[in-house]
Image (spheres, grey):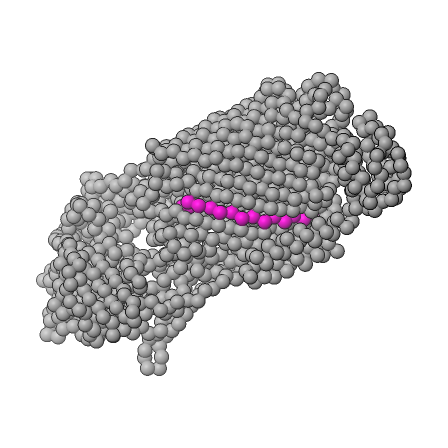
């Protein structure tokens, strides 16, 4: 009888549900997203978080009060603008808050402050200094598949005194009357096997539709560094190949790298623990980070002639 | 009310029911009526015996039963016995329905002598650990230590000693000595070896020292139980016991009472092993053929142990057969092993050697080639155990132990075209090494000294070389980039441990140890060479040195026939750089025999840990590094209290229940987003926080008969709180398991055939998955809005509970002695009903389009499993 009693108690205990107490999920958080630079339109997107299982389309919150500061000095009140095509860059500009005439300068700290429904959401970042580069040793060759490959080296000097982070990507342009040298995606693949590249993002990336390489200076801190890049043609040969070297802030790098890690760990790395995406929004979620772009263009048709 | 509270109430109810139920049936409560004035004790005992059917056993030479009892007004047997104890100096012990009477011992008896010596296996000469030696008259005695040594002060009136050990024939030997004597006793193994106990079985006539939280791992069982790929593993068997939980599936990492694997002090012949894992933890480094004894302590730690928060796993290697040459060979699916032992000089010097190697590389090389870019892949692991011992005399014995184990892997690959050549290669290697020299010296019959000199090391190395040559114009540019990572730990130690048994009621241990630590906490060393010019070399390994001193004293004190305690104090001093930390750690475990069937235990311990393992993955990566306490990193601490009850249902069935509460502080973790592979000091990438765990553990065991086995169930909760993780909010420990149930069954079909079954059910791991999402940035630098934009998932640490894990494993074993050879064939099936247990969950992004062409994003949880149904076979021959 006692054994029966013991077993009964044991199985009563095992019958307790295997569960974790789930608290109420608070999805009411503000989201602020902006990468701002010296070269591209300044836009801050705003929205709210949602439950992971909700089907949502995020919408900007249009009635927020936003202020931008430079080194703690008031720069101006942000205004909301709808999505539109930017003539200068031939680019779709998403809806969001902007400050007309804003031109961030290297070394300055920019802080944004939004107020809505009694809540204040802030974020800040330092604009990195521009890192220029040169293009050398251009060569047209073929790869194993006998595709035409345009090869060049880019060389830049990494500033000694600080940790620096970079994004390299390419765009193409056509001289035709419609495109008028505007940057476009497509036209050429970009490849590099340089060992300093930490993240390769080949398409539809967080930061660009184009192929991107993301790296830090931990392998070449304070020295002049050369990276060899291969470009292969997959549509009609563009007139211009534009190579962009972005000097990005640490917050930019952390956000992009952790976003990529989150995806990689979620989909590829079987044993890895989940990764949290870097977030620098106080009292909210998202990213507010700066980059400084250097661009050089190569006349491909001339190179091929 | 939460489930833990419900469990605690149930626990108290269980205890109450047991006590009540047993009290009603106890012979002590038998009503008696005595009508006799001025009767002698002998006469009254005779009357009581007739009325109650209880037999009294006593020696008239020890007890004066002719004296008259002044009071004879007793309602029950217990009142009579209490009167005898209080006023007539006569104690009693209940043995089944019989009662033994004996004089109360008062400290050291005048005219006593000390009998000391060793207990060993009569066929192999192996010393027996934890065997019992006691007087059959008084039932008081002692047990052998880790070297098979015992020392027992006996009254000159005692003329017999009984020696017993599970799996061996009990012997009673005459001790007609008039002076201190060294006595070496050999026990014959039982012919019937089915009596395998998990919990040290409480024999009806033996008052064993069985401290709270201590489990003896059934090594005989280990080789019979079904395991993945048929590779037997002592640590995986330990995971089937209450309070010890697994990490991820297939992993031999142990999470004891909510602690992490680095909180287990794993000792091989008393020497710490820092990485007990082969193949990322899917196998332990311990070859079962080489292990003689394994004990696991998870609470109420004796003072002789220190330096870890959660458990002590004390493994002892076989010493070598001193009588004859013997050995064995075993062939399994993934590895083969052999062992050989025998005398070098009969009864004086013996050796033991075993070796194991996998042949995974022979199978997987081609497979990996097919699924990866690598042209060449190799992975294997091996280990070697060796031991020599020499007996100089009955008083002096020397042991030399050696262990080495290593995992090796390498791969090569590359691409080449007319203008570009790439070549990459990688090497990976990790392993432990242990040397131990021990000298046992019986200084006098009461005083035993074990002196130890030891060295333990663990090292890890990975080296990746990437060569890149490209041509522009006619010139080739050569780049070579190499990443080398080395880490490890070296420990030298020297220690003295004394066993001093001056009185029958006290077994005193004291001693000290000095340890010299060398931590290589590693750092990626990178070289970047362009056309012969070395441009950069970044980071040197961080090496840290530390000195540690441990002192301890403890006493196994038999306070009364029913009450005993292990009382101790452990002191540690850790000095690193200019900083030192010290800790005074009181230890106490108390055992009270409520009657001969029920034992109550209580234990408490404070522990401090000076080195921790930084882990960044769900498997035990070899690159996980041991890091020391530094001036910035405080040692981890824990306080644990436990309370338990043990109930011998009958001679075959035992039941125990234990509750515990443990608080931990200054635990170490990587800060959010950090990992090992970064170029700054590890100290800049870690955070310290607290943890707590509490739970109830139940064990029902059947240890005798054709059908044996156990049911182990744990109800527990374990959490962590780190200031910089999860916004400072408490989160569940990754391997927090509310329920953990293991049923292990062994049925002996015939003399040669037996079947084993294991069924495991446990709450799923806590995983970081994410409960809220928000949009990733939409601003591309050109060309607008992406239709496939991914959401960013905001994750709270361990915010998702995986589905419960369960599986059934079966094995059938055939054993037969043919001539001089003992054959064993084991065929097993892992995960019999092919349960797809979740190893990993991930959120998959899904996108769909509505009728208006609008795209919508959503997420779905996908579950991935690792091991499904897997057969195994192993065959071994022993001679």
Q: Is residue B143 left or right of residue B481?
A: right
Position of the N terminus of chain A, as image quadrant, is bottom right
Residue B219 quadrant? top right
Query: For the point 27% across and 51% down, which residue is it?
Result: B416
Q: Nearer the viewer, residue B510 or B650?
A: B510
Q: State which region is magenta.
A: B654-668
Up/down of B451 relative to B271, above or below: above
Relative to B210, does residue A14 appear above or below in the rendering?
A: below
Residue B869 belongs to magenta span: no
Relative to B220, is B308 on the left or the right? left
- For the point 32% across and 79% down, the residue is B853
Residue A50 in view (yes/no)? yes
Main SS type for the magenta part? strand
* Residue B433 in view, yes or no: no
Confirm whether the magenta stretch covers residue B657.
yes
Quadrant of the image for the C terminus of chain A?
bottom left
Q: Is residue A220 left or right of residue B822?
A: left
Q: Is residue B16 above or below residue B217?
A: below
Say which residue appears at 68% left-offset and 58% top-offset: A8
Q: Which sits in the foreground, B356 or B757?
A: B757
Pick the front one: B605 or B148: B605
Locate residue B849, reporting x and y percent. 35, 77
Identify which residue, B577 or A248, lies in the foreground: B577
């Amino acid at each position: 009888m006692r054994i029966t009693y013991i077993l009964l108690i044991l199985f009563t205990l095992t019958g307790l549900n295997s569960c974790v107490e789930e608290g109420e999920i608070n999805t009411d958080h503000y989201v602020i997203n902006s990468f701002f630079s010296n070269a591209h339109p300044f836009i801050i997107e705003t929205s709210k978080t949602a439950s992971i299982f909700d089907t949502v389309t995020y919408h900007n919150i249009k009635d927020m009060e936003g202020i931008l500061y430079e080194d703690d000095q008031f720069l101006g009140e942000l205004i909301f603008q709808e999505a539109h095509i930017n003539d200068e860059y031939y680019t779709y500009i998403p809806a969001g808050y902007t400050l007309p005439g804003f031109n961030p300068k290297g070394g300055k700290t920019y802080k944004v402050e939004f107020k809505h429904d009694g809540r204040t959401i802030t974020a800040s970042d330092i604009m990195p200094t521009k890192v220029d580069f040169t293009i050398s040793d251009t060569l047209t060759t073929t790869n194993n598949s006998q595709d035409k490959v345009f090869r060049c080296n880019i060389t830049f000097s990494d500033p000694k005194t600080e940790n620096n982070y970079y994004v390299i990507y390419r765009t193409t342009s056509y001289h035709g009357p419609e495109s008028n040298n505007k940057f476009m995606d497509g036209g050429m693949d970009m490849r590099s096997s340089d060992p300093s590249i930490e993240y390769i993002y080949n398409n539809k990336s967080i930061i660009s539709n184009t192929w991107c390489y993301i790296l830090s200076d931990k392998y070449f801190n304070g020295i002049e560094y050369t990276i060899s890049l291969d470009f292969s043609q997959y549509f009609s040969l563009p007139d211009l190949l534009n190579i962009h070297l972005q000097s990005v802030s640490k917050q930019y790098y952390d956000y992009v790298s952790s976003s990529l890690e989150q995806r990689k760990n979620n989909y590829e790395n079987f044993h890895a623990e989940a990764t949290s995406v870097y977030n620098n929004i106080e009292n909210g979620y998202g990213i507010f980070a700066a980059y400084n772009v250097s661009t050089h263009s190569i006349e491909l048709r001339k190179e091929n002639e | 009310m939460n489930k833990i509270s419900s469990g605690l109430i149930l626990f108290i109810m269980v205890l109450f029911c047991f006590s009540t139920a047993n009290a009603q049936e106890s012979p002590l409560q038998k009503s008696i009526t005595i009508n006799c004035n001025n009767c002698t004790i002998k006469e009254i005992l005779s009357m009581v015996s007739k009325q109650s059917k209880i037999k009294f056993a006593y020696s008239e030479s020890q007890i004066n039963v002719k004296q008259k009892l002044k009071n004879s007004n007793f309602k029950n047997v217990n009142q009579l016995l209490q009167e005898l104890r209080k006023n007539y100096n006569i104690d009693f012990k209940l043995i089944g329905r019989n009662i033994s009477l004996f004089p109360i011992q008062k400290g050291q008896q005048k005219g006593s002598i000390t009998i000391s010596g060793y207990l060993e296996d009569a066929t192999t000469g192996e010393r027996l650990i934890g065997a019992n030696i006691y007087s059959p008259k008084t039932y008081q005695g002692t047990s052998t230590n880790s070297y098979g040594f015992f020392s027992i002060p006996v009254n000159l009136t005692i003329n017999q000693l009984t020696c017993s050990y599970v799996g061996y024939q009990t012997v009673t030997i005459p001790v007609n000595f008039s002076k201190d004597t060294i006595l070496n006793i050999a026990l014959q193994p039982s012919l019937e070896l089915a009596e395998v106990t998990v919990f040290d079985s409480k024999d009806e006539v033996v008052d064993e020292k069985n401290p709270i939280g201590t489990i003896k791992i059934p090594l005989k069982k280990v080789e019979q139980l079904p395991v993945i790929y048929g590779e037997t593993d002592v640590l995986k068997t330990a995971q089937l016991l209450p309070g010890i939980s697994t990490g991820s599936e297939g992993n031999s990492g142990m999470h004891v009472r909510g602690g992490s694997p680095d909180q287990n002090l794993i000792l091989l012949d008393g020497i710490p092993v820092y990485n007990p894992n082969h193949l990322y933890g899917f196998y332990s480094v311990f070859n079962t053929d080489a292990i003689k004894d394994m004990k696991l302590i998870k609470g109420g730690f004796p003072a002789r142990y220190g330096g870890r928060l959660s458990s002590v796993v004390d493994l002892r290697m076989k010493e070598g057969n001193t009588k004859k040459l013997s050995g064995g060979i075993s062939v399994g699916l993934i590895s083969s092993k052999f062992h050989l032992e025998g005398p070098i000089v009969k009864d004086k010097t013996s050796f033991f050697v075993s070796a194991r190697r996998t042949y995974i590389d022979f199978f997987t090389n081609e497979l990996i080639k097919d699924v990866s870019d690598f042209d060449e892949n190799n992975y294997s692991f091996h280990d070697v155990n060796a031991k020599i011992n020499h007996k100089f005399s009955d008083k002096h014995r020397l042991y030399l132990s050696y262990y080495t184990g290593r995992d090796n892997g390498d791969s090569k690959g590359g691409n080449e075209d007319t203008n570009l050549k790439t070549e990459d290669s990688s090497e990976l290697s990790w392993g432990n090494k242990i040397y131990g020299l021990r000298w046992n010296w019986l200084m006098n019959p009461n005083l035993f000294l074990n002196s130890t000199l030891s060295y333990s090391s663990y090292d890890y190395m990975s080296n990746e070389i990437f060569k890149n040559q490209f041509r522009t114009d006619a010139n080739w540019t050569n780049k070579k980039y190499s990443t080398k990572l080395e880490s490890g730990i070296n420990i030298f130690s020297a220690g003295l441990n004394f066993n001093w048994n001056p009185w029958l009621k006290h077994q005193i241990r004291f001693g000290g140890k000095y340890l010299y630590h060398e931590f290589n906490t590693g750092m990626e060393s990178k070289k970047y060479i362009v056309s012969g010019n070395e441009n950069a070399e970044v980071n040197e390994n961080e090496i840290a040195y530390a000195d540690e001193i441990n002192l301890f004293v403890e006493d196994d004190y038999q306070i009364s026939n029913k009450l005993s305690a292990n009382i101790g104090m452990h002191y540690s001093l850790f000095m690193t750089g200019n900083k030192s930390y010290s800790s005074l750690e009181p230890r106490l475990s108390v055992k009270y025999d409520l009657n001969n069937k029920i034992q109550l235990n209580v234990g408490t311990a404070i522990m401090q840990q000076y080195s921790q393992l930084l882990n960044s993955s769900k498997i035990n990566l070899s690159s996980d590094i041991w890091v020391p306490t530094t001036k910035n990193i405080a040692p981890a601490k824990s306080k644990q209290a436990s309370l338990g009850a043990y109930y011998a249902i009958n001679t075959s069935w035992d039941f125990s229940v234990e509750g515990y509460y443990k608080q931990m502080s200054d635990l170490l973790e990587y800060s959010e987003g950090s990992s090992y592979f970064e170029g700054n000091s590890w100290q800049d990438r870690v955070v310290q926080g607290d943890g707590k765990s509490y739970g109830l553990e139940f064990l029902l065991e059947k240890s005798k008969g054709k059908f044996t086995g156990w049911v182990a169930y744990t109800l527990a909760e374990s959490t962590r709180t780190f200031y910089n993780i999860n916004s400072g909010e408490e989160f569940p420990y990754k391997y927090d398991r509310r329920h953990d149930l293991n049923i292990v069954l062994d049925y002996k079909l015939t003399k040669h055939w037996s079947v084993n079954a294991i069924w495991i059910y446990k709450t799923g791991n806590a995983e970081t998955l994410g409960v809220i999402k928000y949009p990733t940035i939409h601003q591309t630098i050109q060309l607008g809005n992406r239709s496939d934009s991914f959401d960013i998932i905001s994750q709270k640490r361990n915010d998702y509970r995986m589905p419960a894990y369960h599986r059934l494993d079966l094995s059938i074993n055939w054993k037969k002695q043919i001539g001089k050879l003992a054959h064993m064939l084991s065929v097993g099936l892992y995960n019999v009903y092919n349960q797809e247990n979740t190893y990993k969950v991930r959120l998959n992004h899904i996108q769909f389009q509505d009728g208006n062409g609008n795209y919508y994003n959503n997420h779905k949880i996908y579950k991935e499993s690792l091991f499904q149904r897997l057969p195994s076979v192993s065959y071994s021959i022993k001679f």
